[in-house]
Amino acid sequence: MNYNETGKRIFIRDENCPIRNVVAQIGDKWSILILFSLADGADRFNSLKSRIEGISQRMLTQTLRELERDGFVERTVYPQVPVKVEYKLTELGQGLTKSVWGLVSWANEHLDEIKTSRNQYDQEHNEKTDNQ
Amino acid sequence: MNYNETGKRIFIRDENCPIRNVVAQIGDKWSILILFSLADGADRFNSLKSRIEGISQRMLTQTLRELERDGFVERTVYPQVPVKVEYKLTELGQGLTKSVWGLVSWANEHLDEIKTSRNQYDQEHNEKTDNQ
DNA sequence: CCGTATCCCCATGGATACTG
DNA sequence: CAGTATCCATGGGGATACGG
């Protein structure tokens, strides 16, 4: 944590923010789902597609490319007919997944509290309470 | 981790995914920045606004409301003139922030590896390397 | 000081069709 | 099987002006 000349705390400005680089990357709609889907072993494109409900071919490809670019996922092509492509976590990707797991655990343990808070807030503010 | 009838691993389907509820909430553009800005003490609206570079009044208000709704942030109004509004982390919010901190640390430690991987990927794919 | 209300741009991402 | 290409709807979020 830093302080500037006025004594104000500074944190996570865009240029020098490490978390923004990573969270912006894996905070999207699909990255974490893919990471965890690969957590216990390599998998093929269409297998991932069927396991991750709701993902489109387009987004699976795109997200896998980004994860590969960041060095979290390794792509291996087996030149057979039809072609087989396997994706698996790199060591870096395993480290990330493990690190994200802490957040997942916390979310699991406190989901009820959060939902309760949401419902209460919505009631107090007279909004619809059809959240999950 | 679950398995379905075909032996395929299932994970994080929308309906029963705890992480989606939380990550979707704090994985946005500003939530984490606000959480960490409040990590070492309460702060006022305009102070937050000036400390979090680039955030608009609209998004600061909106994100604070969501964090308040989830029970991560508490809002206190001091009815003086002009009015003073303070935001601070709840215990739940402190727990979340602490849990996110693991990810932040990991990102800090491995940012160089990630950047290197990105540059290498971009070179190999003949794309512009003007990423940060 | 602390917001709300509007307008509006543009990136995300779904649907669909096509290829090696 | 594993993608790419294209079109297009939705909404996130910036800019601005105004209100208690």
Image (spheres, coloured by chain):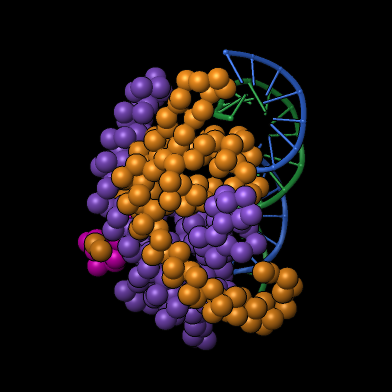
Chain colours: A orange, B purple, C blue, D green
Residue at 32% x, 62% y is B102
Residue B125 x, y percent position in the rendering: 40, 22
Left or right: where does residue C10 sit relative to residue A109? right
The foreground one among A52 and A124 is A52
Which residue lies most toward the front here? B6
Q: Quadrant of the C terminus of chain A?
A: bottom right
Q: Is residue A70 visible?
A: no
Whether B116 is drawn above or below A118: the answer is above
Whether B107 is drawn above or below A42: the answer is below
Residue D1 x, y percent position in the rendering: 58, 30
Magenta region: A3-12
The foreground one among A93 and B93 is A93
Whether B120 is drawn above or below B1: the answer is above
Q: Quadrant of the N terminus of chain A?
A: bottom left
Residue A125 forms part of the magenta stretch: no
Residue at 34% x, 76% y is B41
Give the prevailing secondary structure in the magenta stretch: loop
Residue A4 forms part of the magenta stretch: yes
Q: Which image quadrant for residue A2? A: bottom left
